[in-house]
Amino acid sequence: MSFHQQIQGISLFKGVSAESMNLLVAQAAYKKYEANQMVIGETDQVRAFYVVISGQLKLSRSSAEGKEQTLSLLGSGEPFGLCTAFATESFPANAIAVEQSVLMVIPGDLVEAVAQKEPTLLLNIIQILSRRLKESMTLIESLALKEVPQRLSSFFLHTLSEKAGPATDRLELSISHRELAKIIGATPEALSRALKKMSTDGILTVQGRAITILERETLENMAHGG
């Protein structure tokens, strides 16, 4: 698959004309980042679209005390910077490479010019923002109302359905347990205790980053507070 075909396969660009795609590809910059390298810091003045071409990034916020909360993980094909591409406001989170990654960076004014001619691009942006809003609301609910085992159960179920479909009971984490703890808003120690308890209870098995769900119904009950 050529690079151009790879870009066309990204949901952000679905249905966009070849002419506009050629313009976006030609004027975009392509940047490589190493693992743990900061891509954008919260409060940075940014007016660009970013698309993950390869690798993985995380969006996170940090408290004054230094506590980090991971908001989202972004893999190949995922765009970000959508909320700042049409404005000059600061970026609302830190964007950090989890592993070596390549990003496509499209100037905001170029995206705006293309969007004026391509309503499909705007519809794609709205769909992505709507999904991100729903995910953010789910995260807020989980952090505010659920205990660590419930948050962990919800994360596993969401990842299974998103990555492999509902019939699959095995997942391979793309992140370390420490990074997982940041996603569910727990300390690494609390995460370790929850995993050990769930393993002892026969709900799942853990082998490094490989998680196998043994009792899916029990996991679903835990996720819903049962």
Image (cartoon, helix red, strand yellow):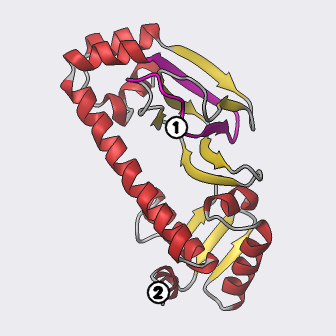
Residue 65 seen in the current view = yes
* Residue pointed to by mark 2: 221
Horizontal side of residue 213 vs 107, given as left or right: right
The residue furthest front is: 64
Count numbered badges in the picture: 2
Circle 1 sits in a helix, a strand or a loop, which is it? loop
Compute the Cα span from label 2 to label 1. Answer: 32 Å
Q: Nearer the viewer, residue 144 or 220?
A: 144
Q: Does the magenta stretch include residue 92?
A: yes
Q: What's under tag 2, amino acid-wise?
A: Asn
Q: Quadrant of residue 200?
A: bottom right
Q: Which mark is residue 76?
A: 1
Q: What residue lies at 21% left-to-right and 28% top-to-bottom?
A: 120
Q: What residue lies at 70% left-to-right and 79% top-to-bottom?
A: 194
Q: How crowded is mark 2: few (under 14 residues within 10 Å), some or many (20 or more)?
A: few
Mark 2 or 1, closer to the camera: 2
Q: What residue lies at 48% left-to-right and 13% top-to-bottom?
A: 28
Segment colored magenta: 86-107
Task: Please state the horizontal and vertical placement of residue 4, each as a whole percent of the image.
Answer: 42, 18
Task: Please state the horizontal and vertical placement of residue 110, each as a whole percent of the image.
Answer: 37, 12
Q: Quadrant of residue 98?
A: top right
Q: Is residue 87 magenta?
A: yes
Task: Please state the horizontal and vertical placement of residue 205, each as a whole percent of the image.
Answer: 67, 78
Up/down of 185 relative to 61, above or below? below
